Image: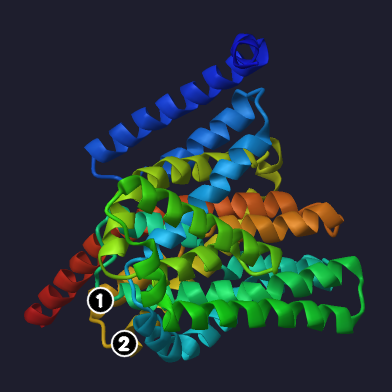
Amino acid sequence: MILAAAASPEAAGVFIELGLIIVCLALVARAATSVGFSPIPLYLLAGLAVGGLFPLGFSEEFIEVGAEIGVILLLFMLGLEYTGEELRDNLRRGLPAGALDILLNFTPGLAAGLLLGWEPVAAILLGGVTYISSSGVISKVLSDLGRLGNRETPSVLSLLVIEDLVMAAYLPLVAVLLLGVGLAAGMASMAVAVVTAAAVLVVAIRYGEVMSRLLANNSDEVVLLSTFGLVVLVAGVAERLQVSAAVGAFLVGIALSGPVADHARDLLSPLRDLFAATFFVFFGLQIDLAAIPDVAVLAVALGAVTAVTKVITGWWAAGRAGVGVRGRFRAGGALIARGEFSIVIAGLGVAAGVDAQLGPLAAAYVLLMALLGPMVTRSIDRWVVLVMRRRAATTADA
């Protein structure tokens, strides 16, 4: 059986194509690292080029599973950086900023959809696309730039968690609206999602030490298999209960502490990097190049508005935590990127056929913001320093 599979032309083609993609990603990462640049935008462009110019023959389901694992591991590794008590305190302090986030970033998409003459459900979907930042992109960029320990990062983290928890209520409600099911069924579905997310959060905070002791072991193999299996299992259960798989993985990371957290971080970092690259490539593969020109101007306008509103959100949230000017700008810049959730939201509308423009507009918008976010996050420090120097010079001259 193994020899027959190895001799299969289809299997050989899949291995060759997959190997070529991974080698290309290695070259892209090498080039980005050599100039000190985040490879994420280059991964996205690679996926866009492959999907639009050089379509491949292997199953998209195969790449999709790898991409999902990438997001799960990104959020799990981000969760390892914080304890349950820190998360609880950040969520408590971050609720006002979370409300501002909804107001400033959901409204532009909703208003744009209504102004375009779309049905209310389509406009609500576009509001979700502009609201939710990309936890996957942001966590990867912060990790690449070594900013996970910065003072402003907990403010960014709390906003991302609140957004993901909002999605636990938003996605079931939207799904019900698209299906035309009764209000009672929609509220029940939303309640299940919210209760599940809250229950997992309580377990992570109260029983994290017990879980850490159970997973601890001197064997790398035992820790790797135990931790990876638990993360994927919890993520799958969370997804089945209509809570984000990313939220489930993040909370597992929060629950682990002490030596086992350090051990898991060392073992899973290479897997995270491999599957995260797969996620960004898969995202690019989903975008139809031919449909983008018709909505490009609208996507740029929407992107400009919501980039500013995200910066304002991050600035205010970090300011409430006592972070300085540069850190407040870093927090705002980090939140600009949109990604996986926005595509999921738009995909619901496309599948339901709510509006022909929703899919291309969301794709162009998310691609723009996924490219813009990492670039702004990396360079915003330099911009702030230049502005502060010019302001100081102007004050001195006066």
Q: Nearer the viewer, residue 293 or 222?
A: 222
Q: Which residue is mark 1?
A: 151
Task: State left or right for residue 165 relative to residue 291.
Answer: left
From the top left corner, tell me how far across and down residue 112 is, in percent: 70, 69
Residue at figure coordinates x 45%, y 61% from the top left: 75
- The earlier-in-sequence mark between 1 and 2 is 1
Q: Tag 1: Cα neighbours inside 10 Å, few (<14), some, or many (≥20)?
A: some
Spatial CA distance of label 1 from label 2 is 9 Å
Q: Is residue 219 above or below residue 30?
A: below
Task: State left or right for residue 8 relative to residue 327.
Answer: right
Residue at figure coordinates x 36%, y 84% from the top left: 85
Three-letter residue code for mark 2: Ala
Three-letter residue code for mark 1: Arg
Query: Pointers 1 and 2 in contact (CB under 8 A)?
Result: yes
Q: Nearer the viewer, residue 315 or 392?
A: 315
**How many numbered markers are drawn?**
2
Considering the image in quadrants, where does the C terminus appear? bottom left
Label 2: element kind:
loop
From the top left corner, tell me how far across and down residue 39 is, in percent: 37, 42
From the top left corner, tell me how far across and down residue 179 is, in percent: 89, 66
Instruction: Using the image, tell me which numbered label, if any, was put on residue 40.
Output: none
Residue at figure coordinates x 71%, y 41% from the top left: 291
Q: Nearer the viewer, residue 169 or 260?
A: 260
Q: Which residue is mark 2?
A: 321
Q: Is residue 384 above or below residue 73?
A: below
The image quadrant that residue 87 belongs to is bottom left
Q: Report whether residue 309 is seen.
A: no
